[in-house]
Amino acid sequence: MNKKWKRRLLLFYRGWGFSLIIAILIATSFKSAIADWNDIPSGSMKPTILIGDRIFVNKLAYDLKLPYTTWHLAQWADPERGDIVVFYSPNDGKRLVKRVVGLPGDTIAMHKNQLFIDGIGIKYEPLDNEVINQIAPARQSHHLFFSENIAGKKHPVMFASSRPSLHSFGPVTVPKGKYFMLGDNRDNSADSRFFGFVDRKLIVGKASAVVISRDESFFHPRWNRFFQTLM
């Protein structure tokens, strides 16, 4: 590199180049440790979260991590039953979105898609048609829809009774420092039934709302889902 280009690079760095680098570091640190969003490419959390949703992830919901790492600097809360969380899969490290159904010390079982926590069967009620109608009519006929009540928190779930799935298992006891995750689309979700318990340190944050949403073509906006709170 000749002296002319070295001088130009030095002037760029001394000018606004250094400020640009600092701004990028601040922005990426914010996303890494404070708040982020997650695009949804799969239907494992239907009908709560749909393909094409972009969800807000509160990374300060439970703790403060060193930016770009999973190292905890401070912790003030733990995930609760029914929370929707973003975490790194213990299987392959991919970021996933699932619902917490088992806390450390809980005994979890499932029998023909009915969930049991500490030997008590979870209650299921009819689901509001407004939620069901967010699923394409052609797919509705192949699924059963319910409102599931976990620790007083009601949320929608769906089952495909004709699809082979791990709809019965356990009982298993959640170890200390671990969590048991399930997708709301119970017969189409790779979750703790397959990759096991999730370590506390792998949990990134709490998913609290849909920020924007587009249909499965990722082109047309679904305005009714914009800024919708997640149950």
Image: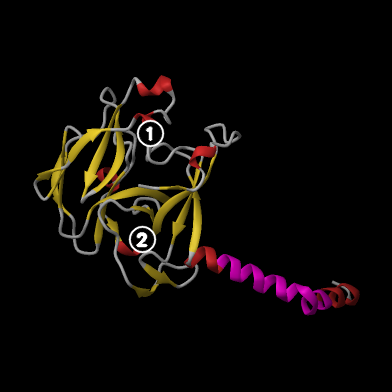
Q: Describe the element under mark 2 as helix, strand or loop.
A: helix
Identify the image quadrant of the N terminus: bottom right
The location of residue 87, given as percent across then percent down, is 38, 55
Taking the magenta stretch, the answer to whether it contains residue 17 is yes
Vertical side of 32 occupied by 194: above or below = above
Magenta range = 10-28
Q: Residue at x 48, y 67 (%)?
A: 33
Q: Residue type at mark 1: give it.
A: Val
Nearer to us in this view, 198 or 104: 104
Q: Describe the element under mark 1 as helix, strand or loop.
A: helix
Nearer to us in this view, 84 or 128: 128
Considering every residue shown, the one lying at the far left of the view is 119
The location of residue 143, given as percent across then percent down, is 31, 25
Q: Is residue 211 left or right of residue 208?
A: right
Q: Quadrant of residue 168?
A: top left
Residue marked by disc 1: 131
Q: Pointers 1 and 2 in contact (CB under 8 A)?
A: no
Q: Residue at x 49, y 41 (%)?
A: 225
Taking the magenta stretch, the answer to whether it contains residue 205 is no
